[in-house]
Image: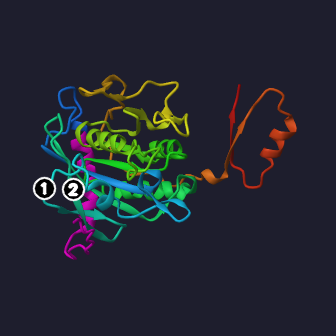
């Protein structure tokens, strides 16, 4: 049985020094991204799963499906594709700027790339339906990645599908000088349902985040990896729920291998310290779709909204 044990860190740990290591991690990541070193070279990589909520972790309740805690124990530990049966190890995770915890981690079986992925799940204190996410939630995700950037090779964010594309786009601009993969995924059916897409979406995200040096915010769904700021939701029920109409997928998962289009991957041209931009005042920006016959008074009414700082026009 998996016990989700949380302990305080050793008081002697120098947190300032750990934060300073972030720049060193960025430098080493960039140096590994030449044509001959596009995969993480260790036989065991480390990935942090950040659980925000969404359909993937839902269980049946009296009033329907609701987000549920304990995803590692109930959703992943019983499945051989996520648990090779090796001993559970405690891994260090920064819960906030000053508090560290030890979380239980599991390990996947050896992949076709001769690599295990060891992962831990850090759950939001309040699990959200995707319709409840906002700029504060985006900030919490970004800061969680920033605090733990030194300790993991990649990050997977589990998220509801309705607003996943918005979150992926926001994080693409919030995470500055990114040197590691950040992959958002979720599902149309919960992991605990017999027929679901959660298993393949999550396993594919783990393998890519722990194997390939793709230093971008991405969205993975139905065997395709999209650039985070180019993806959009196209279906409320199909497993192929997302698409990137104006840009090809960065990678496609097949029965034989994961085909990465390396010529499309953004690669840093110089070394910069990883940072997070969190002062985005998006609450005062509106979006208006222009359609044939729209009246000027409609546009004028939007422009007169008190406190408005910007207007995005979706034109013909």
Q: How many marks?
A: 2
Residues 311 and 87: in front is 87
Residue 16: x and y in percent read 27, 65
Question: Quadrant where the C terminus lies?
Answer: top right
Please tell me which of labels 1 and 2 falls first in the chain.
1
Q: Is residue 91 above or below residue 156?
A: below
Which residue shows up at 21% across the image and 37% down it?
31
Residue 70: x and y in percent read 35, 64
Q: Determine whether, in the image, residue 263 is placed left or right of residue 28.
A: right
Q: Determine whether, in the image, residue 128 is placed left or right of residue 283.
A: left
Residues 238 and 19: in front is 238
* Range covered by the magenta-colored residues: 1-29
Label 1, secondary structure: give it. loop
Q: Residues within 10 Å of mark 1 (few under 14, many from 20)?
A: few
Residue 302: x and y in percent read 78, 45
Which residue in the structure is indicated by mark 1?
86
Q: Determine whether, in the image, residue 126 is placed left or right of residue 14.
A: right
Which residue in the structure is indicated by mark 2?
106
Q: Is residue 250 magenta?
A: no
Q: Residues within 10 Å of mark 2 (few under 14, many from 20)?
A: many
Question: Quadrant where the N terminus lies?
Answer: bottom left
Q: Is residue 22 magenta?
A: yes
Whether tag 1 and tag 2 are in contact, CB under 8 A, the answer is no
């Amino acid at each position: 049985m998996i016990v989700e044990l949380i302990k305080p860190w050793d008081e002697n740990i120098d947190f300032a020094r750990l934060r300073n290591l972030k720049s060193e991690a960025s430098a080493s990541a960039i140096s590994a991204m030449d044509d001959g070193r596009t995969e993480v070279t260790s036989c065991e990589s480390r990935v942090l799963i950040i659980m925000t909520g969404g359909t993937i972790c839902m269980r049946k309740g009296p009033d329907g499906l609701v987000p549920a805690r304990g995803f590692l124990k109930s959703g992943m530990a019983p499945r051989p594709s996520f648990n090779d049966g090796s001993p559970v190890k405690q891994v260090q995770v920064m819960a906030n700027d000053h508090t560290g915890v030890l979380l239980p981690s599991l390990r996947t079986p050896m992949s076709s790339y001769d690599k295990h992925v060891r992962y831990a799940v850090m759950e939001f204190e309040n699990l959200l339906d995707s319709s409840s996410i906002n700029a504060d939630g985006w900030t919490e995700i970004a800061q969680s990645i920033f605090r733990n950037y030194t300790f993991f090779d990649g990050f997977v964010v589990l998220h509801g599908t309705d607003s996943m594309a918005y979150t992926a786009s926001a994080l693409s601009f919030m995470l500055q000088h990114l040197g590691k993969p950040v992959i958002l995924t979720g599902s149309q059916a919960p992991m605990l349902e017999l027929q679901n897409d959660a298993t393949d979406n999550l396993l594919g995200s783990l393998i890519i985040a722990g194997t390939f040096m793709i230093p971008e915010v991405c969205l993975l769904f139905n065997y395709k990896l999209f650039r985070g700021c180019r993806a959009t939701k196209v279906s409320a029920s199909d497993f192929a729920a997302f698409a990137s109409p104006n840009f090809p997928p960065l990678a496609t998962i097949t029965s034989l291998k994961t085909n990465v289009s390396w010529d499309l991957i953004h690669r840093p041209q110089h070394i910069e310290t990883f940072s997070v931009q969190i002062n985005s005042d998006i609450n005062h920006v509106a979006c208006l779709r222009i359609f044939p016959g729209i009246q000027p008074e409609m546009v004028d009414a939007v422009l007169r909204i008190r406190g408005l700082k910007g207007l995005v026009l979706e034109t013909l």
